Amino acid sequence: MAARPFRIRTITSFITIDPSDFDNEASSLKEKITACSRLLRDGESQMTTAGFEVQTIRIATNPFGEWLVTNNKEDVNERLKRFNKLLSDCDINFCSLGPSYDPEHTTTICPEIVSIAPGRFSCSANINAGDITAALAAAKCIKTISLKDEGEHLQGGLGNFRFAAASCIDTVPFFPGARAPKGLGKDTIAFAVGLENGGFARQLLQEAGSIENVQKVFHDKMRKELLPIQQICVGLESDGMQYLGIDTSLNPSLDDFGSVAEAIECLDEVGVFGHPGTMAAAAAVTTSLQSIPDVKTTGYSGLMLPVLEDRRLAELDTLSIQKLLCISSVCGVGIDTVPIPGDVSERSLASLILDVAALACRWNKPLSCRVFPVPSRLAGMATSFDSPYMCNSSIFPVE
């Protein structure tokens, strides 16, 4: 079998948890996680047999405020501890606990969620347009997390890898914004697929050569590669198992030629990513990704531009946060894995979060703001992260 041109970044399952799931030593929660694990392992096995490399399997829940929070902090800690153990028993290493809708939960519970070793949990804060209180709470949370260092997954500001301020997010399989779809029944498991395909994006855009050819190339070539994945997923559907679709986003890797920004530069109209022509290219790619014939899409299904996960983005000294946000107006994901000064004020950070929320809510598109205040580092200085998931770059000014 010929090698597939991209990897499966994640198969993500979605469940709705109820407080009663923790009764009787969390027997009901154990059943849900075990059922998720069976589904995910089955999907992983079939996709591997079909020639795809599956990097991760994950679980995302409904907003944690619906099932985790009680009046007793010890109960919260005990539920997190028990949940963490059940996930470990099933060898599930990534779990998003959904968004916070309460500013108090954002400032007090979210930092605790991401702090739990070994870094299995992620979460987010829902931000509506103009909600200053929520934005300030998210900013405070980000600053709090950045100063935590009681574990390898937190040191140097890395904790914010697992937290984002998110707007208009629903069925996204990527973390940390993933959450169970609204209205998902408590006895139903939904699932979706996310890709890692920067190298394949480069191949497609080299073939296209020009913006005017992007749609035809993507519709022909991506459709051919995605249909086998979709066929497997449809086959996994049964009573209580619901397939949501594939997030077709162009998502970079740290491999040679894995950069999405570098792939965009293959188009005649672009030259250097961020220069004139970039928005037109991003729009053309996103429109194509969201309209691939016969493929059920979900999530962002756009252009993912995580600075610390894309070597070309990380090296560009002409890039700015505002430029990234501008490009996000025609694609996804928002401001993602951007290092910022450790002394950034909560007010400035909240203003950035409000900008992202305004754009997301104005156009009803999923966007998030995931930034890393780096302790003791100023704008223009280099990061020194030691993570297999990220590269390093200069720190971006916020103001």
Image: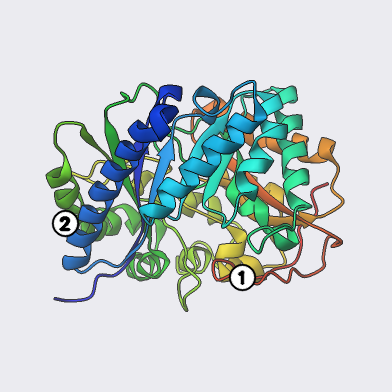
Q: Is residue 338 above or below residue 328?
A: below
Instruction: From the image, tell me which residue sits under label 1.
Output: 391
Q: Residue 397 location in percent, x, y?
A: 80, 54
Instruction: From the image, tell me which residue sits under label 2.
Output: 228
Asked whether residue 126 appears in the rendered view, the answer is: no
- Residue type (three-letter) at the residue carrying disc 1: Cys
Please give left or right for residue 81 compared with residue 90 in the image.
right
Q: Residues within 10 Å of mark 2 (few under 14, many from 20)?
A: some
| Residue nearest the observer in this picture, 7 or 23 | 23
Identify the residue at horizontal 39%, vertical 36% (top origin).
171
Name the element at disc 2: helix
Q: Residue 338 location in percent, x, y?
A: 67, 55
Q: Is residue 206 above or below residue 171?
A: below
Identify the residue at horizontal 42%, vertical 66% (top origin).
198
Identify the residue at horizontal 26%, vertical 42% (top origin).
35
Please give left or right for residue 80 compared with residue 358 in the image.
left
Q: Residue 238 location in percent, x, y?
A: 14, 36
- Residue type (three-letter) at the residue carrying disc 2: Pro
